[in-house]
Amino acid sequence: MYRYDEFDAAFVSERVAQFSDQVRRRISGELTEDQFRPLRLMNGLYLQLHAYMLRVAVPYGTLSSRQMRMLAHIARKYDRGYGHFTTRQNIQFNWPKLRDVPEILADLASVEMHAIQTSGNCIRNVTTDQFAGAAADEIIDPRPIAEIIRQWSSLHPEFTFLPRKFKIAITGSPNDRAAVKFHDIGLMAQTNGAGQVGWAVYVGGGLGRTPMIGKQINGFVPHEHLLAYLESILRVYNRYGRRDNKYKARIKILVHEEGLETIKAQVEEEFSHVRGGILTLPQTELDRIDAYFSPPAFIDSGVVSIDVEREKILDPAFGRFLVNNTFSHARQGYTSVTVSLKPIGGAPGDATAEQMDAVADIAERFSFDELRVSHEQNLVLPHVALSELRAVYQALAEAGLAEANAGEITDTITCPGLDFCALANARSIPIAQDISRRFADPERQREIGKLKIKISGCINACGHHHVGHIGILGVEKKGTELYQITVGGDGTEDAAVGKILGPGFVADEVPDAIERLVDAYIAQRESAEEPFIAAYRRLGDAPFKEALYGNG
Amino acid sequence: MAMADPVPSQGPDKLRALGIVALNGMFDEMDAEGVLRQAAEDILPADLALVSSFGADSAVLLHIVSRVDPSLPVYFLETGKHFAETLEYVEQLKAELGLTNVIAVVPDPADLARFDPTGELWETDPDSCCHIRKTEPLEKVLSGYGGWVTGRKRFQTAERGVLPHFELTSDNRIKVNPLAYYTHDDIEAYKHRYGLPDHPLYHQGYKSIGCAPCTSAVAEGEDPRAGRWRGLDKRECGIHFDFNGQIAPTRKQAGKTKEMRLFKNGGFMADPWTDWVEALDPAEASYTHVPLDVFVAHREAFIASPHPLGLRVDPGHRVEDVEADMARFSSVAISFPAFGDGRGFSSARLVRERFGFQGEVRAVGDILADQVPFLRRCGIDAFVVANPATRQALENDAFAEVSLYYQPVGTRAEVPVGTRPFLRRALADA
């Protein structure tokens, strides 16, 4: 993975010193909260319902064991013993004290981490496929380009006061696990006619109150011109994006209102000026960054496959883990393991300091020191030898991290909701917990198969409810929390926004409503091989609407 | 000793600032020769020049120069508007003091042809006249030196009341004022002691002598500089604007004295430019930033105007629309009505990088201190800011700027760091 050189280290430590001084001035009263606000936001420090919240960037979701141990240390020393992994592949600490924040940032800097640009109207942390650099279906490892974009966008002098925040996601695989079409810019690896790998660029996707699927603005941008092309899009957005209404300020609205062709023409005009200029990426630089991401020293253990059916009989729990929590690796004899942070009845995405330490140890022993954070709020051990899979499973089980539900109905994405978030209208974690308990039985989950439930506590859609196969949106109506249920969303390459089928439900009714949807699916699916989303596409709204609201 | 090993013309350096403080404590108030010798021999060897008006009391400083180093470059602003007596006096002093390196600095003929074709600009707009005949030519010359010597004295104007021997300018050069503590009587005594010749007009009542049209005699007992720009609220020509942020107001603006609102070259100064006034006749506009849309609407009139013009770019203005006319503007003002509106950052880069505009590009409006480093990277080199915290940060140069940049921009002197293609740092720190 990427390692800071002396320059990166100097950059981050200067930034820490700068913010430490600002915090000191705030505590001494020299800065008012109004003056401090834009400064703290640029350093990832929010003021939440109960306390400050610090959001730490995990660039493209990649962590080393050392970094994970530092997150554990921070959780233990400065917080209440846990952290929350987010749908942006970041981690949030919910209870830091302002006076401790400079020390936290210094601790982070000591392991090459920071909180720069995790908030504010700037280019945010670049996100990617949690299996990047490991997945069997990958055209190219997207992390080197993600790192190059991270560097280019760090404290960019022109793009730090954009109309609104700006998110870039990148995938190296045609099977999109990074929801790139729901980002301001999505990049998808593409091979052109000459066999070169470059990037299809999507623009104007997003969730929030106006969900939009990104539109392809360029079918193939080669590596060398990618930064110039991104700068062209950002400049058009910075100049012409709406600033009169923060709810209409994202680039998706600009693309929607002006039309893709207009925006494309403006971007191409801008690109014609900057193309081939100072942002041209030399092959030597790409090679240099690539080298940081070269594959680890894989060993041939002789084990190239596991008889899953046999393991299921010997140990059903391990068998289930093999089915759900492993992912095909590019290297024979290896697999990527998903560490679920969705224990039955738990708060999705939360990990205790002890669990973080345990995962760090396991990654060090069994995964070449590498960890990933997925946008689905799980952790990933990207490179586990099949011969060691059983040992990994046992180690995870000892740490309470062997929940074998990856991709199943209890593996929900959930935002922090009204329990923490100042923006939320409704609680979301308790809803996730209720659903999780309702469907706790592994056999029931197996029967249901792959089904993504995503829950947001407000219209801002941090829980990605629009792209859940089943989405749940908490709203506040006349003083009570109501939950709107959507069906048919999809965050992958087959992007779709879920549909609302009728009125909302109060919290207590939600598990029953979900159960009715699930039962309707099971009753009408062609076979157990037809997942929920496929059945929905085939059947349409009607049976699901009836399941929710009856035949009236 | 820190001050004995200066690195001229380089970036801000607190050690050098401290060195200045120490230097100012080293010399007896009246030891003008010691001050100049230290400057010429130790601090800025071969990197120091002097500007002289060859006015009423220039002889004292020039005499000190002749004792320290007769070959020190002495620049004389040959504005083309001097008294004949002044020009004679130049030759007389050269000969008598043995000065071997007196150099006349003349205004740019193109500027004269453009802004003062009739030679009467002094009458309608003395600030502009000083600007093209003194400030601009001098800037060109002095930018090549790590420091320069002035003949300013504390007694001359209230604004000069705290003048030290050595000043560090914001662009980290040194101004040396050997005569800072000399009173009018000290000057007279010095002239008398060494038998220095007076300016031929001195005994006709001219106690402070500049260009002929803007100098008049003063009455007995009157402030010696009262004869400069008489009748106008103007006391400095603009070449000393950098002094400690304390500068003379230039002229009356609608009955109100202009504040020191412009921050440029490291200090606050009176702003030679005025804000655009609605419905101003294009022919009347002078030293004003014309809003881009107004300029486009009355392009012919503005192009035909002989006056110096600036361009104001508001959020939403398309700078492309005036790309072909950029040479018409002496200054560009990018407005920031609200700090969160970052459109001006793009406008600034386009003006600087794409159009190659070389003149002043100022940011005007609601600007946070923490935006200043970003703005500078986008090509902004001057600020007119209301926000008190930002003004204070500008004044103290208190910006917690990260000194490494992850992305190249083409707007100011930045150099690659190491072998990485996109990493940059400011040239001054390299």
Image (tube, coloured by chain):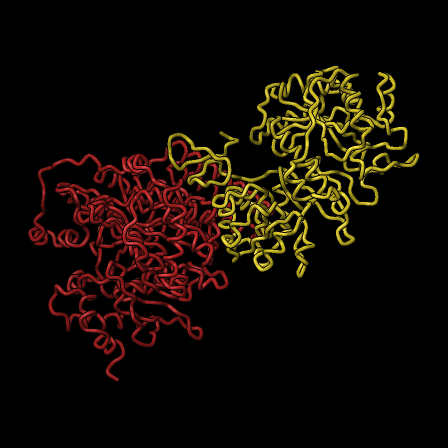
Chain colours: A red, B yellow
Residue B252 in the figure: left or right of residue A350: right
**In the depicted structure, whether residue B74 falls above or below residue A176:** above
Q: Nearer the viewer, residue A450 or B2?
A: B2
Residue A355 in the figure: left or right of residue B40: left
- The quarter of the rendered structure image containing the N terminus of chain B is top right
Residue A40 in the image, given as x and y percentages of width and height: 49, 49
Say which residue appears at 50% left-offset and 45% top-offset.
Answer: B355
Residue A76 in the image, given as x and y percentages of width and height: 39, 44
Q: Residue furthest right?
A: B220
**In the depicted structure, whether residue A164 falls above or below residue A515:** above
Residue A400 visible, this angle:
no
Q: Residue furthest bottom?
A: A552
Residue A331 in the image, given as x and y percentages of width and height: 15, 42
Image quadrant in which you'd find residue B196: top right
Say which residue appears at 24% left-offset and 48% top-offset.
Answer: A131
Residue A195 in the figure: left or right of residue B399: left
Image quadrant in which you'd find residue B111: top right
